[in-house]
Image (cartoon, helix red, strand yellow):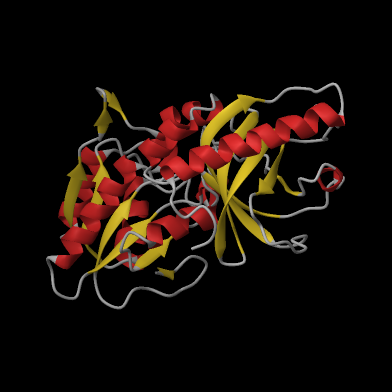
């Protein structure tokens, strides 16, 4: 996938463009992107493309101030989208577009940047200053420019629309396996490994520590069965999300013990941690002996969960 963001580059030829925030790239988002890929395949020379704002720059009211808690970082969001058959992506800063009228947005994005033959969006797609335009306005703007518009119906589960808002709630409640099911991929973060207190080494469970960014959605504090990708390999792991009440932490972080890891210094490396299933809430222990016993129990619980649903417990 070719990232056009921050460049004057444009696709070679025409495109079918999926448009949306796609902040969780959940099943509803995948339906929109999939339709653009399908539409592009039906016309010789047309390539599938995606327009999406950098979620980390989007604010809740289109203004400076409070922002939307993102499910996936920009890097991970683009990685997932790239795996869906998309040829081009344009993911600019929201603040550079928020004051454009609907006509300006359509001209700049669909015409100038993408030379679009087809535009694809969900039925609830909004654009233009203060989200003033919807699908009916977009239809007229596309018609004037000879662009075919395809709208994709919402995807429901159990009678309820699959939405990023609902998925954020599930993650916040620790219902991670259900969130993963709606996402179509595991909730994960890829972050640098930082120096901790190295207490895990004294407990015979050396861990990696990763601070969770302020704008990242925070899972329910507690312990999770997880998978950790580092050095090109994926390992089963157990991750504690929280503030480590027994020993203390200044800010929420992920502390992960990598099961069967062969060893090595990971400080300064970047590790991807995917949460699989919630094991227990975070709690304070009476001391390090009790903490060590609980970590051993959590590790065994995680191992059983991963072996039941993931055959490649070690590396692949």
Kindly tell me whether residue 243 is visible in this rendering.
Answer: no
Q: Is residue 250 above or below residue 114?
A: above
Image quadrant where residue 249 sits: top right
Q: Which residue lies at the image location 46% right of the left edge and 58% below the top edge?
A: 78
**Who is closer to the viewer here, 99 or 282?**
282
Along the viewing direction, whichever of 120 and 29 lies nearer the viewer: 29
Left or right of residue 295, residue 78 in this image: left
Q: Is residue 11 left or right of residue 278?
A: left
Q: How many marks?
A: 0
Q: Determine which quarter of the picture holds residue 214.
A: top right
Does residue 299 appear in this view? yes
x then y, percent, for residue 42? 12, 65
Q: Residue at x 39, y 57 (%)?
A: 81
Residue occupying image coordinates x 43% and y 39%: 180
Residue 225: horizontal and vertical position, in percent? 56, 39
Q: Is residue 211 above or below residue 89?
A: above
Quadrant occupied by the N terminus:
bottom left
Query: Which of these two is toward me, 62 or 31?
Result: 31
**Along the line of sight, the residue nearer the viewer: 57 or 73:** 73
Q: Is residue 270 above or below residue 281?
A: below
Instruction: Locate residue 77, reporting x and y percent.
Output: 47, 53
Residue 125, image x, y percentages? 31, 40
For residue 52, side relative to residue 156 (left or right): right
């Amino acid at each position: 996938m070719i990232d056009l963001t921050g460049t004057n580059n444009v696709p070679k030829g025409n495109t079918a463009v999926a448009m949306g925030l796609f902040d969780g790239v959940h099943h509803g988002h995948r339906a929109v992107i999939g339709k653009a890929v399908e539409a592009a395949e039906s016309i010789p020379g047309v390539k599938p493309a995606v327009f999406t704002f950098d979620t980390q720059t989007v604010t809740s009211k289109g203004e400076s101030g409070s922002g939307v808690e993102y499910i996936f970082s920009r890097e991970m969001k683009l990685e997932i989208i790239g795996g869906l058959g998309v040829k081009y992506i344009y993911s600019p800063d929201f603040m550079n577009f928020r004051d454009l009228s609907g006509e300006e947005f359509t001209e700049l994005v669909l015409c100038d940047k993408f030379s679009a033959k087809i535009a694809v969006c969900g039925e609830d797609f909004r654009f233009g200053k203060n989200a003033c335009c919807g699908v009916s306005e977009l239809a007229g703007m596309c018609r004037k420019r000879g662009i075919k518009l395809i709208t994709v119906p919402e995807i429901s589960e159990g009678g309820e629309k699959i939405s990023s808002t609902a998925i954020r709630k599930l993650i916040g409640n620790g219902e991670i396996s259900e969130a993963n099911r709606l996402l179509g991929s595991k909730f994960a973060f890829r972050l640098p490994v930082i120096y901790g207190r190295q207490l895990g080494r004294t407990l015979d469970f050396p861990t990696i520590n990763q601070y969770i960014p302020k704008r990242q959605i925070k899972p329910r504090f507690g312990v999770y069965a997880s998978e950790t990708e580092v050095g090109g390999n994926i390992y089963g792991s157990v991750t504690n999300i929280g503030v480590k009440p027994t020993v203390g932490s200044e800010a929420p972080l992920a502390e992960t013990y990598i099961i069967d890891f062969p060893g090595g210094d990971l400080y300064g490396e970047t590790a991807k941690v995917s949460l699989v299933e919630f094991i227990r809430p975070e709690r304070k222990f009476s001391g390090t002996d009790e903490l060590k016993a609980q970590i051993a129990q959590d590790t065994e619980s995680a191992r059983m969960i991963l072996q039941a649903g993931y055959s490649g417990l070690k590396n692949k």
